Amino acid sequence: MIIKASQRSGARNLANHLANTQDNDHVTLHEIRGLAGQSLNAALLEIDAVSKGTQCQQPLFSVSFNPPQDADVKQGQFDAAFAKLEQKLGLTDQPRVVVFHEKEGRRHCHVVWSRIDVDNMRAINMSHFKNKCTEISRELYLDNGWAMPQGLQNKAERDAFQLANSEWQKLKRHGIDPKEIKSLIQKAWQSSDNSERFKQALKDSGLFLARGDKRGFVVIDHTEKVYSLSRHGGIKAKELKTRLGSPDDLPSIALTNVRIRNIYTKEMLGKVNSLKNQHKAQMRPYEDQKAALIKKQRQERREQQEQHNLKRKATMQTVRSRFRKGVMGFFDKVTGKAERLRLIGRKELNAVKAEHAESRHKMIFEHNRERAELQKQMRQNKERQLEERRQLAKTIQQIRAEQRAEQKHDKLRQGFEDSTLDKGQDKPKQDKDGQAINRARKNRRERDLD
């Protein structure tokens, strides 16, 4: 599984992010270890409070574990991954919080460890933790027999598309899908082999290449929103320089915006917005179906949890009822019968716990399968809509090119007719204001109208 880790502060913001049910279908607080707080927010704030006794500025070690898309990963496999990381980074027995997220048919896990060693009141040093996490990721893929991604096999083939969560959320708030921007840039990049072809391919997708103020190469969409080409396109800076040369040869952002306004007139923007509204209407049934499915799944999980609680309580009651009280209970303790009953009861409770874990896992797997099927339909529809938007952008470029060609042709024709008129008639004596020439041209236009 892919492991991503970071040292950070901001316990409250992290708790809000991990508890976010708007962007995630299901959020499950699986474990709180070594902390008095029994809620996600309280536990992380407790870690932050303990760190105040030290000079540590980043007391939280936040790690995400992302298994392959179709892998049936059980809790024991996640626990083994946690143990590997703890041993490698010196976090064994450190307080931690485990949260599971399910989104778009995929299940992944977030674990937050405390870096503070309370015995010595010092922060645990996390040297080279990213390299160590990469090593653990490779080991987990090999141990579980999963197909290893190319980026893990060869660092040079790793996807350069890395956006901070704040950047991602900012784009989503503006109604922009970062994955769509990446897809458009990647398609243009793959279909071109030089700067001119790349610029034309971007234009056909409604994007324009420009020189950024700080980031070198940038692309701008028809709303004049600026994107870093390397960050949003997942293209390495070295590859950009090799194929595109120096960004100094490109127009500035301000000049590119002027050109965009000339192309995307009020009429053209109306066509773009009309298609956008049409696509929103097409996606609405899918969104309604998604909301209904998530609501149904959450209800099923609540009902299952209630059934598990009832069975666990009934089993505990049965185990307790076997222990006699009074003199006979004392006799059972002396003879060892009470200890045998305790071991039998513990075995029964563990069996119930394992049964519940298995049934819970089956339900989670089935729910993710249902959600993945719906997500597949939504993704296919979005890909079709993306192609329609690309075709519209290409059509707008063609219309604008035809208009420019027509304007150029009209200008040439006007110049030719003016020169013909001047040659075919005696040129009147011109005054200093050129009034005679203007009168001659006016007479010619009137004859043409007649």
Image (cartoon, rainbow, N blue to C red):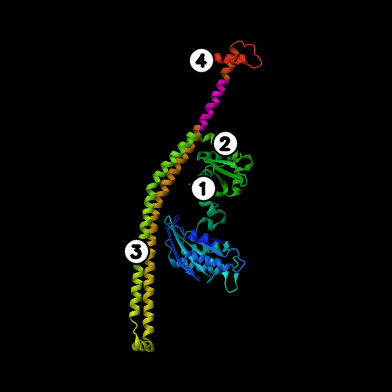
Task: Determine the residue positioned at 35% across, 79% down.
Answer: 320
User: Mark 4 falls on what kind of element?
Assistant: helix
User: Mark 2 falls on what kind of element?
Assistant: helix
The amino acid sitting under disc 4 is Asp
Dot 3 or dot 1, earlier in sequence = 1
Residue 303 badge: 3
Estimate the x, y position of residue 43 in percent, counting from the top left: 50, 67
Dot 3 or dot 2, earlier in sequence = 2
Residue 182 badge: 1
Residue 448 badge: 4
Dot 4 or dot 2, earlier in sequence = 2
User: Mark 3 falls on what kind of element?
Assistant: helix
Q: From the viewer's perspective, is the residue at label 3 or at label 1 nearer?
A: 3
Q: Alpha carbon of mark 4 to alpha carbon of mark 1: how far?
A: 55 Å
Q: Which residues are magenta?
A: 400-414
Mark 4–mark 3 contact, CB under 8 Å?
A: no
Residue 258 badge: 2
The answer to which quarter of the image holds residue 117 is bottom right
Task: Name the main secondary structure of what is drawn in magenta.
Answer: helix
Q: Nearer the viewer, residue 37 or 359?
A: 37
The amino acid sitting under disc 3 is Glu
Q: From the viewer's perspective, is the residue at label 1 or at label 2 nearer?
A: 2
Estimate the x, y position of residue 275 in percent, counting from the top left: 43, 40
Residue 285 drawn in magenta: no
Residue 407 drawn in magenta: yes
